[in-house]
Image (tube, rainbow, N blue to C red):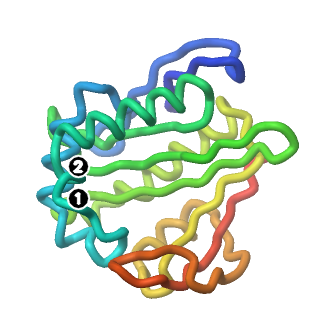
């Protein structure tokens, strides 16, 4: 089972994370030095992701912006509020999966989002990464629940969520502004404990 580096008031120990998803792909905690590789991945996948993400400014696709994003996520990670991960092939980033908005107390929940490089789709990487994150969220983070939202027309992502045991809990009208338009999303969750 993969183990992910955690620290902060909610965790009793610090461990490291690195788990293979395929022969040449590793899932691991993001680090500050990944910003350039993340920016390169976003540039390569700008068209591939455009239909599924908010409209991005040109600055988003720079190493400088991604340095800020990764630094912010690692700060949230240090306090137990975020789990920022990268899928890597060597030094190249070929995807991301994050658990954000981690809430403790009686909620014990987090929101998961992910994407895989367009040239790596169809290899089961998103499914393997999500299943690793589900196991870690349950076994190491002690979360009760993970949630994910998905555009109704995103059949591939809906299959990934279903394979990982996420169930539909409803529809949120005009939930997120994706590709420049407020769009409905299917809401899904996986009860972990």
Q: Where is residue 123 drawn, in percent x and y?
A: 28, 60
Residue 9 found in image quarter: top right
Q: Would you say residue 23 is visible in this rendering? A: no
Q: Residue 140 at x, y = what percent?
A: 65, 29
Q: Which residue is drawn at 48% across and 27% down?
A: 75
Callout 2: SS: strand
Number of other residues with Cα within 10 Å of mark 1, as a class: few under 14, some 14 to 19, many 20 or more: many
Asked whether disc 1 touches disc 2, contact meaning CB atoms under 8 Å apart, the reply is: yes
Which is nearer the N-term, disc 1 or disc 2? 2
Could you classify mark 2 by the number of other residues whose Cα lies within 10 Å: few (under 14), some (14-19), or many (20 or more)? many
Which quadrant of the figure has residue 108?
Answer: top right
Residue labelled with disc 2: 94
Query: Quadrant location of residue 126?
Result: bottom left
Whether residue 179 is situated above or below residue 1 in the rendered picture? below
**What residue lies at 55% left-to-right and 84% top-to-bottom?**
184
Q: Mark 1 points at which residue?
A: 117
């Amino acid at each position: 089972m993969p183990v992910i580096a955690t620290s902060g008031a909610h965790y009793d120990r610090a461990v490291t994370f690195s788990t293979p998803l395929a022969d040449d792909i590793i899932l691991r905690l993001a680090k500050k030095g990944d910003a350039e590789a993340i920016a390169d991945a976003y540039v390569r996948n700008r068209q591939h992701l455009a239909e599924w993400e908010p409209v991005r400014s040109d600055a988003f696709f720079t190493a400088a912006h991604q340095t800020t994003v990764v630094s912010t996520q690692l700060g949230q990670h240090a306090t137990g509020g975020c789990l920022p991960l990268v899928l890597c092939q060597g030094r190249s980033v070929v995807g991301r999966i994050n658990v954000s908005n981690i809430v403790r107390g009686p909620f014990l929940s987090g929101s998961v989002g992910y994407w895989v490089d367009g040239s790596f789709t169809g290899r089961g990487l998103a499914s393997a990464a999500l299943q690793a994150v589900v196991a870690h969220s349950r076994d190491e983070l002690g979360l009760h629940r993970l949630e994910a939202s998905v555009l109704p027309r995103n059949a591939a992502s809906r299959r990934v969520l279903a394979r990982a045991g996420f169930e539909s809990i409803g529809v949120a009208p005009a939930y997120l502004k994706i590709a420049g338009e407020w769009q409905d999303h299917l809401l899904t969750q996986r009860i972990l404990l």
